[in-house]
């Protein structure tokens, strides 16, 4: 099992690590996102609260590269939002691949499902609309890739369960682990930062 912690800039409180001009340049010189994903991202930006939570094209491409690199057939995603990252994974899986994604927000996932139905890869995605910890106890592994990107208060719990569900040569991806630079503070300003610091220490141990 391999573990990779990644830091994106999405989230209501995230401070950008990369200049917008650099990100735009990188997007312009990277593989294009699918038309369905582009429209999903645009509607998310126009209609959803905290649209910055959506995975962008560059991070989506990274997720696809990771899924392809491990030859993933089963992916578990903890945190769906509007389904962009789930669709990224589905597009990179073989025809018999499966993405299980879990969330509790019926509004954001309704938007997700509408766009999944428009994609030839959407049938690979299976939504579990329930608290993630309940879903994680109910499902069985192994999964080739697990992506944790949900409520920070449960990050440690999600990580422990992910260790039980990941395949021997699988990869666990964890988002937001630098938390806009807040993790550098010796006295964490809030509980989310403290939990992320605890998780990072646990992963390192």
Image: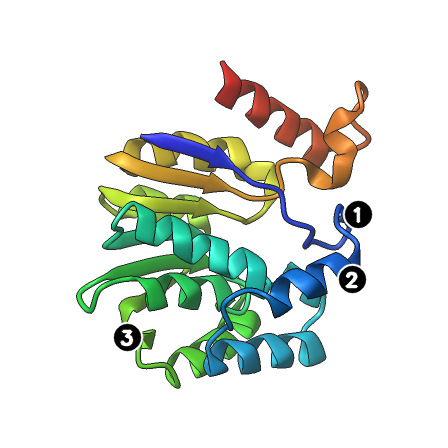
Residue for point 77% across, 50% down: 16
The structure's colour scheme is rainbow
166 relative position to 148: left or right: left
143 relative position to 61: left or right: left
As displayed, is residue 126 above or below residue 74? below
| Mark with earlier residue (2, 3) | 2
Could you say where residue 46 lies in the image, as x and y percent from the top left? 70, 80
Label number found at residue 123: 3
Label number found at residue 21: 2
Under circle 3, the secondary element is helix
As displayed, is residue 180 above or below residue 16? above
Can residue 167 be seen at all in this image of the molecule? no
| Mark with earlier residue (2, 1) | 1
Residue for point 45% across, 54% down: 63
Could you say where residue 22 lies in the image, as x and y percent from the top left? 74, 57
**What whole-number distance in Å separates the C-alpha atoms at marks 2 and 1?**
15 Å
**What whole-number distance in Å separates the C-alpha atoms at marks 3 and 1?**
35 Å
Marks 2 & 3, CB-CB < 8 Å contact: no
**What whole-number distance in Å separates the C-alpha atoms at marks 2 and 3?**
36 Å
Q: Give the mark toward the camera: 2 or 1.
A: 2
As displayed, is residue 97 above or below residue 149? below
Q: Quadrant of the N terminus?
A: top left
Of residues 125 and 33, the one drawn nearer to the viewer in this rendering: 33
Residue on which the image places disc 1: 15
Residue for point 56% across, 71% down: 108
Q: Give the mark toward the camera: 2 or 3.
A: 2
Could you say where residue 43 lies in the image, as x and y percent from the top left? 62, 81
41 relative position to 9: left or right: left
| Mark with earlier residue (3, 1) | 1
How many residues crowd around disc 2 within 10 Å: few (fewer than 14), some, or many (20 or more)? few
Q: How many marks?
A: 3
């Amino acid at each position: 099992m391999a573990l990779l912690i990644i830091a994106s800039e999405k989230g209501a409180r995230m401070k950008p690590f990369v200049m917008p001009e650099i990100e735009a340049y990188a997007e312009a010189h990277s593989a294009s996102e699918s038309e369905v994903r582009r429209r999903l991202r645009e509607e998310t930006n126009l209609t959803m609260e905290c649209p910055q939570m959506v995975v962008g094209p560059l991070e989506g491409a990274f997720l696809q590269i990771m899924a392809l690199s491990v030859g993933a057939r089963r992916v578990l995603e903890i945190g769906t939002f509007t389904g962009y990252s789930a669709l990224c994974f589905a597009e990179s899986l073989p025809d018999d691949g499966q993405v299980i994604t879990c969330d509790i927000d019926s509004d954001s996932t309704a938007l997700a499902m509408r766009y999944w139905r428009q994609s030839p890869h959407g049938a690979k995605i299976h939504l579990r609309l329930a608290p993630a910890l309940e879903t994680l106890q109910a499902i069985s592994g192994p999964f080739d890739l697990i992506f944790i990107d949900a409520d920070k208060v449960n990050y440690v719990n999600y990580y422990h369960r992910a260790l039980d569900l990941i395949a021997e040569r699988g990869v666990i991806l964890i988002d937001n682990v630098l938390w806009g630079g807040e993790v550098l503070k010796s006295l964490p300003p809030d509980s989310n930062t403290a939990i992320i610091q605890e998780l990072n220490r646990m992963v390192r141990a």
